[in-house]
């Protein structure tokens, strides 16, 4: 577990804990490491909602499928990021989403009952763990609100540009790399990939953006002014 201390130190759940404290806390929580190959599930929808996960390496996606099998990507998670905590602590019996490895990945799984049960040997750090957990869940709610804002835009073009302008603001630059490929971006924004690709091509042809793969550049970006739609 020591090899993962640098990654775990970036995880919101373990903020404020030093490496020796991490070792003690993980032993207390009885953490298990799971290796998951690309395309395979960490969890599937319907499995018991018992575990909190931390990405140690690779990338995983949180996916929801509707009645007709149409999927929507709720989140793309990188090393150090937390997943399934909202569902595990909500009191529901089964997972309403699937968590799938989009690259060969390693994840740390923590039993939620061990997280909620205070350990007498590391009481202070368990209290800190719970504080971090509450803060992390609040941040996830903010991210969900952001996704809802994108999806509430009227047109596919507006959804794309709302997302890209937020990415530019996040990176502090008109050039940036997004954490999605084209299919994943379409799933995240809740649009058809073909329609999204067509709008991206129009924006590129008009000189409003440039893009290659996951790299984007907003060409007519003007700080403090809204994007002009044509």
Image (cartoon, rainbow, N blue to C red):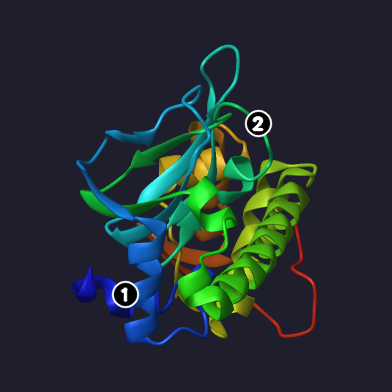
Residue drawn 75% across the image and 47% down it: 148
In percent of the image, x 63 and y 59: which residue is there? Answer: 163
Say which quarter of the image contains residue 225.
Answer: bottom right
Q: Is residue 216 left or right of residue 6?
A: right
Q: For mark 2, does the 10 Å Cα neighbourhood hold few (<14), some (14 to 19), or many (20 or more) residues?
A: few
Asked whether, in this view, residue 227 is left or right of residue 178, the answer is right
Residue 199 locus on image (x, y percent): 57, 45
Number of the label disc, if any, that sits on residue 92 = 2
**Mark 2 falls on what kind of element?**
loop
Towards the viewer: 228 or 192: 192
Q: Is residue 133 left or right of residue 226?
A: left
Mark 1 residue crowding within 10 angstroms, few (<14) / some (14–19) / many (20+) = some
Query: On residue 23, which mark appears?
Result: 1
Which image quarter is the C terminus in? bottom right
Q: CA distance from mark 1 to mark 2?
A: 30 Å
Q: Is 73 situated left or right of 43 in this image?
A: right
Image location of residue 204, percent across then percent down: 51, 59
Horizontal and vertical percent position of residue 139: 68, 65
The image shows residue 140 at horizontal and vertical percentages of 65, 58
Mark whose residue sits in front, 1 or 2: 1
Q: Of the numbered discs in the image, which one, if any, rests on residue 83? A: none
Q: Residue at (62%, 37%) from the top-left corner? A: 190
Name the one closer to the observer, 70 or 204: 70
Q: Residue furthest top?
A: 68
| Mark earlier in primary sequence (1, 2) | 1
> Can residue 71 be seen?
yes
Q: Is residue 3 above or below residue 18?
A: above
């Amino acid at each position: 577990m020591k090899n993962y201390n640098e990654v775990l130190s970036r995880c919101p759940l373990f903020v404020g804990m030093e490496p020796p404290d991490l070792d003690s806390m993980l032993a207390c929580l009885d953490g298990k490491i799971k290796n998951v190959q690309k395309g395979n599930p960490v969890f599937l929808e319907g499995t018991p909602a018992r575990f909190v996960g931390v990405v140690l390496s690779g990338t995983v996606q949180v996916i929801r499928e509707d009645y007709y099998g149409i999927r929507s990507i709720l989140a793309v998670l990188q090393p150090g990021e937390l997943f399934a905590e909202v569902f595990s602590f909500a009191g529901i019996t089964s997972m309403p989403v699937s968590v799938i490895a989009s690259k060969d990945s390693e994840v740390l799984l923590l039993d939620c009952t061990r997280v909620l049960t205070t350990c007498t040997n590391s009481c202070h750090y368990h209290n800190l763990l719970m504080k971090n957990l509450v803060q992390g869940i609040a941040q996830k709610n903010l991210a969900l609100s952001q996704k809802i804002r994108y999806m509430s835009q009227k047109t596919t073009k507006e959804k794309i540009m709302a997302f890209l302008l937020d990415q530019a603001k996040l990176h502090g630059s008109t050039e940036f790399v997004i954490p999605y490929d084209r299919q994943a971006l379409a799933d995240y924004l809740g649009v058809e990939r073909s329609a999204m690709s067509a709008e991206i091509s129009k924006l590129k042809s008009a000189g409003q953006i440039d893009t290659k793969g996951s790299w984007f550049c907003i060409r007519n970006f003007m700080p403090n002014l809204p994007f002009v739609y044509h």
